[in-house]
Amino acid sequence: MAKLLDVLASLHPGASKRTLRQMVEHRRVFVDGIAATRADVEVQETGKVTVGRKAAPSAEHGLAIIYEDAQLIIVDKPAGLLSVAARDDGRTSVWAAVRRHVAPSGTDAYLVHRLDEAASGLLVFAKDVVTQEALKKLFAAHDIDRLYVAVVDGVLREASGTVDQPLVESDVPPYKVRVLTPHAPPGIMARAESAVTHWRRLAVDRGRTAVMVRLETGRKHQIRVHLSFIGHPIAGDDRYNGRSAPRLLLHALVLGFVHPVTGRRVVATSRPDVTFRRAFSALPDPLPTTW
């Protein structure tokens, strides 16, 4: 095996090491179709290293392609950008940016899942209806590996834990989600959905805790509500009692699944943005990408 930087040097002998490292930092370098995040990783002898274009599908919104093939595309959503917006909404979205990106090839983008507008991280879109349905089935069967990093208020004393509490969404504005109470009316209990969230402590600093989160289910606002329920809301989450922060400190870190067409394992990773990292300087770097 060889270091990625050495492989890049052989592919671009006229480029300086600084330029090659910048290619990696700007997510232009792909190893077997997956964007590399570090120049010092080792590449298998059979690994395919390619360098993509400088432009991202929607550079004005900081949207980056992490993985793309003929059937699907994985992008890195910045905080503050909607996953999807109605055509008459007047606001842009990740979905609209991805559709513009794939349009020149004669394909379209099909929605599979969403991230909260205030959160950041990985989203996958299908390029055809068959792949969309296959990916949705993977999500429904919980055959998708989804890891998140969050910074919560307070110090979590335990090293890890699980929150297994059903959730129900209000049917009146602002449509907040809450944990189902034992004595809720039958009508509300009928609308509740099971929800299981696993968390693991990463670091503690200045009265806050960084945690890795693994979803067993994928309900609306699940991580935010479950962490608030145990007394540790996500920093910056004013909807669910989090204290002030520069942004919602929740990031979709890892997305892994078996490709519904090729059968190959796809694992995409994403690094939290500089605002997130500055808000919690004790965040491990690099972050773990396995549970």
Image: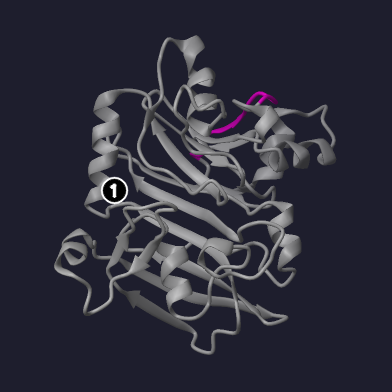
Q: Tell which of 58 and 286 is nearer to you.
A: 58
Residue 53: within the magenta?
A: yes
Q: Picture quarter containing residue 215?
A: bottom left
Q: Position of residue 84 (x, y in %)?
A: 46, 34
Secondary structure type for disc 1? helix
- Residue 261 seen anywhere in this rendered image of the structure: no
Residue at x-position 29% and y-position 32%: 132
Instruction: From this view, report whether residue 196 is shown above or below residue 29.
Output: below
- Residue 145 seen anywhere in this rendered image of the structure: yes
Q: Residue furthest front?
A: 172
Question: According to the image, label 1 marks what residue?
Answer: 139
Specify the amino acid type for callout 1: Phe
Residue 105: within the magenta?
A: no
Q: How is the protein colored in the picture?
A: one colour
Q: Position of residue 63 (x, y in %)?
A: 61, 35
Q: Position of residue 22 (x, y in %)?
A: 77, 39
Residue at x-position 37% and y-position 67%: 178
Q: Position of residue 118 (x, y in %)?
A: 57, 50
Please indicate whether residue 162 sits to the left or right of residue 85 in the image. Answer: left
Residue at x-position 41% and y-position 81%: 161
Other residues around mark 1 within 10 Å, as few (<14) / some (14–19) / many (≥20):
some
Please indicate whether residue 246 sits to the left or right of residue 223 in the image. Answer: right
Question: Magenta region: which residues?
Answer: 46-55
